[in-house]
């Protein structure tokens, strides 16, 4: 988790609350309550015991600091939570956690938390996609230089750039839909994963508990096959990665020498009064790189020994909440940036002017090739580019007027006339998000 | 790629061929041929030119070593390949790579390779799932101690263990089905991603080229949104991770002190004649850890600047073939291991005997609790365990016979009688893979 | 940082305090005070101003939560701290942070924290090395089976195993000595790294400030060359890695089937009363894997653009405190484990018996080869091993007595007689740590 | 290793040869020869046997492809090499690999390779530092805008920028000196690490073998404590990271909109004739990110179980050669870039002009504050900046001439007059590398 000092820069308060200690404890208690209810319904434990357990689970809220030594002793957070629940459950204590194992409760609790956390991310993702759609529309026809390998390439539109930032977000929404049924499952399989202590109605019990919690109930235990968690980590890093790309682009677009697009409130310098730093955009890159790193850890934890591997579980517990918080922070910051995104058409125009039409060289070649062999056309363009190199006052239009006269080069090589499908790409963003 | 010396240990010849230089060059040439065909069909280039290009693309096979300096100069593999194709295409040279950009060809070529590579992995994955189903059936009722946190926990069946190895593989097949339509796309968007040089029929052209290659044709360029590649990396690491878990388990099951299950031909020691090393099982762990590491790199490459980022593309080119080869190696080795997997029931029985019934302690507690408060039951079990601690000749059955007489403890605590749903879990493996 | 719930399992309170928000704020304020002092001494700012700044720096303790929005706006923690200091400094405010840049203060503050943090780690490392030396001595001659590739190999001594755990720790102490002068430097180079605003006495000023803080003062700015931080990360991961190896070994030694060595208080299961989980040893593995992962992030941050790269700095801020805390936790847990480490000679002996002398096969071959060609000797050993395979009651001593009679095989193949340099290796641990 | 197609872009032929299969096999054979020699000298094996082994080791050169199946079976490369040596050694076969274990030979062979590999890297590192020193001198006084957070900050000199690229290289040379004695050691400890089969003269034997190979000979086995390898990985990634920073800077300096500094031969585009891509500089970033990723894997391999862990060793074998090759490639490419580095003073001057003096705002504030309270000075500067914002034709000099008349602002705010210690920093590069 992010420390308080950095919590607004790198963190997200809403997600921190959903994935924090208090929420984790509450979710584990809710898992125990759901287990007790289901067991009572199936006649495995007395109705009154279940009611007492549920009441206790709703009211007892042990302090994480107090539980911490117990977590360290047991190596799993559920145990001191169960102990606190038993104490609060009075005579029903004997029926608390009946037949389950600690990992059942930790995993189920986590799924309860994840359902909410992923709802938050879905909403933010959809919201950001909508904001991007608006901006893609707004700048659909705004020409801007595309840059390949950090060099001016050929014109595109700002709307197309924005639509391309948006495209992966829609895929991420699809991925989320496909992932959720694999992920959001109850865990109830007992000590060795055989459900032996859960009795002959184990399947029914698991389904009942799952239904109560709105989770799935796979027959095969997933105590040790953690592909759901690793897949989730991958999804989170795909999300922050997509935003990281947008952040990197915004940093570059806002460079002093370009200043074509600006988003967010620039950060002030402690000593240079003229500065306006693209802090938020940079942060998107930071968050993406951090999640890309942690993802590796979650995949290392797939190598989960035998029927429970504390070393592997510890990796998950250490990394997953932070990855979720970064995804949430990234989407929140991304939305702030996009909402405030504005272009400076004058600067863009000046940058086109400064390029002197070089970015139209490819287009010129294709235009010439309509009337001559392609190789000959490319030779004329090359000569024109050499002329521009020699004379800093010359434009490609001028040079071609001399070298290949008889065409209205100014019109032919206007940026607007050479945007290809840029506006159509921008228009794809009009399609509603799934 | 794996060096020759380690190619059988860590590599896979079949995948190395599919993802190697020769295949990459051939795939790029095939992409160019498909582009030319599609352009001819739409009347963009002459039919004869397309035919000449296709012929050249089928016959020219430039040596990767010869191309290497050109790749380094251009920073992209397509350029020297295109140069070689132009040279081979004679008078049709002018129509080679018409309107496309290098990345279109590299990316499309890679997708041509990936389609085959992923078919190979799918077949191996399905094959391995089938082998595991057979073995899960064979050992459905074979009791074996489950180990949580490296300690004997409670009995399960070997079939259940095997079915749990298998379960994620089925999910991986589902994930593959869901991923492929996002991944296997043609790239044809031109220099700035606007398709400007591809002319007004760009959409139709892209679709025609895609159809020829059996790929999808998204409207929005994916030159710079590399979530498809990163998702693929995640999938590959999920696959090796699942096998890595199986490998780790096999290594532990085959320890000298347990020797309950054995798979593969043991590796000999250079100096210790008694040894039979679980080399193949260890290798599954190695491959999983390597892919988990490389996955991070692919996600770092999501931060792809502007309309083409050579630094980010280089990461993909360096990592992806190796990850595919490791997945292929892992599945091949996994299949060899599972095919030769055999249990030693005598050793398993001896290990049960050596445990003296301690792993039945949970079961004993539940049995006693039928007739007395749970807390009291647990106290009796605790006393029994202390008795075992004090007397190395005592079993739990003996101890309970004294402490809680009147029950047939030997029958009640027999491993077979306490497997819960283990056999049912093993039986889930009977369901056919998707 | 670790959340409260997991703070005792994965965290370390002492290091968390040294690297926490309050300490970071105090250290930045101390950096500003040292700067003011040095400037006053050199006549750059008035003495009274420096005194007022120092007083304010000692008394003002802004709440991290209050500063968080300012940190997010500026993208760097120093700015709101400086603002708070200016407010507290009254009329001296104009002289606060005079000529410096935010990063100077953040970096210098971090070095003030790191000096203490690394003293803590050094002390714990030296302490652990001493504990290991004691245990290596205690078990110098205790035979135990060495395991290569998870199979019994040949005998060694427990003392040698422990000495091998200790050996890298001594190297880590050497590495620390070599690293510190590269790392513990003041930063004072101003906005563009040229010290322009610091005036003509910039060098003298930097040295004076450094002297006050007990840090070095390199001439060349290190705002953007972060090898010191990345090297520190590597060192921290080497430390946790060495402990992770010890943890993995302890987990394996304590397996139910071996139970040869035991360390720490076993963690209880929530449902299996017989269990005693090696939680602390597993945690050493978790911490090592987490630091190995984060190290990659710190090295990604070496790619630091131009004269300040907020995206790269954010990675450092997010990762370094956690890596330090894990190193501290690992050393604390390691010491607890080693202190409580005890062997079970009876179990070790029983495991030797169960091996039936197979681990002496290499030794037998060398003994026989004294009197016959090596190839012939190895054939006899191979035959003996086959005999053991066929007859589960046979030992290698018995088999060789038949196949190669006339030698006192029981004496020759006694474990104690075949420990090679094990005791000498254990004895190396007697050398004092540097 | 890098495939042929990418070998010039991402690889290095010289290092690939040093770390390739043929070199590895030769090094292992040399290790066996050195062992035999040392054993003969100590009377452990016959002189003639040693001579025959040495002869065979020099002549036999098994094909890696032929050895590959043996490597996969044994899980270690030494075994088939030893088998080939035995076959070639004729009657001396019995004395080949006498008392050693496979890992002794693999590790010693690797150290033989690493000594050469690290000499190559040291030479390249020193050479690059020298080239940078020359260029730092050449551009010592060339003003250029510093950029913090991708925004123009204040002036520095190009020489200072270059000296800052160089500074970490000198530290890397120091680190190398400190690391080598820890790293370059022989391994000779036998099967269980106790040297039991090496006989009573094991220490003397190890020292003799080490002396023959120019390696160290630690008393304690390092079969399982792999901190030397992990530290080496860290060093390699520090090297590529430093170059990655230089590469990122060069990419940014060469952007079309800046074009202030140019290095290397620009890569051509397949379709855009005006382009000159900074391929080599981008590649430095790629190589740095790849090594940063692999470093994590080497640290994961520190968790090395018991007396030999094949899974952990496999990670080292897979990653280390590639990391070395990337470091070599990075230094080679870096040298090419620096050698050809040239500045465009006209473009730099134009960029200063375009900034209109805003980057002098900090300096203006300090100048004004000589005669008035700092807060008042900053208010004047802020007003001047607002004037520049309103009037795109205005410069800071003009604005201040109006707002704070009576000073020669043009002279005071000239870039050359505000470089602080930039030239001195550049001059530090004159100090000879260690």
Image (spheres, coloured by chain):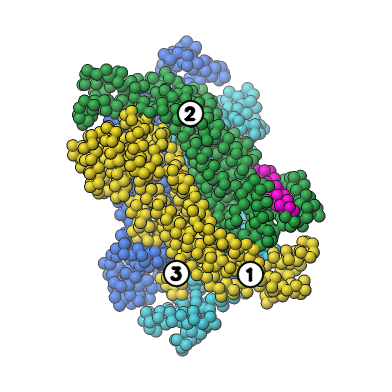
Chain colours: A yellow, B green, C blue, D cyan
Q: Is residue A1 visible?
A: yes
- On screen, residue D134 versus residue B201, left or right, reads left
**Residue topped by disc 2:** B430
Q: What secondary structure is marked by label 1?
A: helix
What is the C-alpha distance between the residues marked 3 and 2? 61 Å
Q: Position of residue D222 (x, y in %)?
A: 46, 37
In the figure, residue A304 lies in which quadrant? top left
Tag 3 residue:
A266
Dot 2 falls on a residue whose secondary structure is loop
Out of D415 and A412, give the one closest to the viewer.
A412
Horizontal side of residue A339 vs D260, given as left or right: left
- Kindly check if marks 3 and 1 are in contact, taking CB atoms under 8 A apart as contact: no
Of badges 3 and 1, nearer the viewer stands 1
CA–CA distance in space, label 1 to label 2: 62 Å
Q: Nearer the viewer, residue D84 or A301?
A: A301
Tell me whether marks 1 and 2 sit on the same chain.
no
Q: Residue at x 63, y 65 (%)?
A: A419
Q: x, y (%) of residue B92?
A: 79, 54
Residue A416, numbered circle: 1
Q: Label the magenta part by its dominant secondary structure.
A: helix
Residue B336 vertical placement versus D239 (above, below): above
Say which quadrant the N terminus of chain B sits in: top right
In which chain is the residue bearing label 2? B
Earlier along the polypeptide chain: callout 3 or callout 1?
A: 3
Residue A73 visible somewhere in the drawing: no
Residue B96 position by quadrant: bottom right
| Name of the residue lying farthest toward the bottom | D406
Give the residues in magenta.
B19-41
Where B432 falls versus D384 (above or below)? above
Task: Using residue D406 as the reference point, say whether residue B354 is left or right of it.
Answer: left
Residue A325, percent from left and from top:
39, 54
Determine the chain carrying the residue at label 3.
Answer: A
């Amino acid at each position: 988790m992010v420390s308080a000092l950095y919590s607004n820069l790198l963190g997200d308060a809403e997600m921190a609350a959903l994935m924090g200690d208090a929420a984790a404890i509450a979710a584990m208690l809710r898992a125990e309550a759901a287990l007790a209810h289901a067991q009572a319904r199936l006649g495995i434990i007395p109705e009154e015991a279940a009611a007492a357990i549920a009441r206790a689970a709703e009211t007892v809220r042990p302090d994480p600091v107090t539980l911490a030594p117990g977590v360290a002793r047991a190596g799993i957070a559920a145990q001191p939570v169960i102990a606190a629940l038993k104490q609060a459950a009075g005579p029903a204590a004997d029926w608390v956690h009946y037949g389950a194992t600690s990992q059942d409760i930790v995993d189920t609790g986590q799924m309860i938390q994840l359902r909410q956390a992923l709802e938050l991310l879905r909403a933010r993702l959809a919201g950001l996609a909508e904001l991007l759609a608006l901006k893609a529309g707004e700048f659909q026809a705004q020409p801007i230089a595309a840059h390949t390998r950090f060099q001016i390439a050929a014109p595109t539109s700002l709307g197309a750039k924005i639509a391309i930032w948006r495209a992966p977000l829609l895929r991420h929404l699809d991925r989320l839909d496909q992932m959720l049924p694999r992920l959001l499952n109850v865990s109830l399989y007992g000590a060795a994963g055989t459900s032996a202590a859960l009795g002959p109605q184990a399947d029914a019990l698991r389904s009942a508990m799952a239904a109560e919690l709105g989770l799935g109930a796979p027959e095969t235990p997933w105590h040790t096959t953690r592909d759901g968690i690793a897949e989730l980590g991958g999804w989170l890093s795909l999300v922050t990665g997509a935003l990281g790309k947008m952040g990197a682009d915004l940093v570059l677009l806002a460079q002093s020498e370009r200043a074509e697009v600006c988003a967010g409130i620039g950060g002030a310098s402690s000593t240079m009064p003229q500065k306006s730093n693209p802090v938020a955009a940079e942060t998107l890159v930071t968050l993406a790189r951090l999640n890309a790193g942690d993802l590796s850890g979650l995949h290392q934890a797939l190598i989960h020994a035998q029927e429970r591997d504390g070393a592997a579980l510890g990796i998950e517990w250490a990394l997953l909440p932070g990855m979720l918080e970064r995804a949430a922070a990234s989407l929140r910051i991304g939305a702030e940036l996009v909402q405030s995104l504005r272009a400076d058409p004058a600067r863009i125009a000046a940058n086109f002017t400064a390029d002197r039409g070089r970015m139209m060289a490819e287009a010129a070649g294709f235009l010439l090739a309509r009337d001559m062999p392609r190789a000959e056309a490319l030779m004329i363009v090359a000569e024109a580019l050499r002329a521009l190199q020699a004379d800093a006052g010359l434009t490609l239009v001028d040079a071609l007027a001399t070298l290949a006269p008889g065409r209205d080069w100014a019109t032919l090589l206007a940026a607007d006339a050479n945007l290809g499908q840029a506006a159509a790409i921008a228009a794809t963003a009009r399609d509603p998000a799934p």
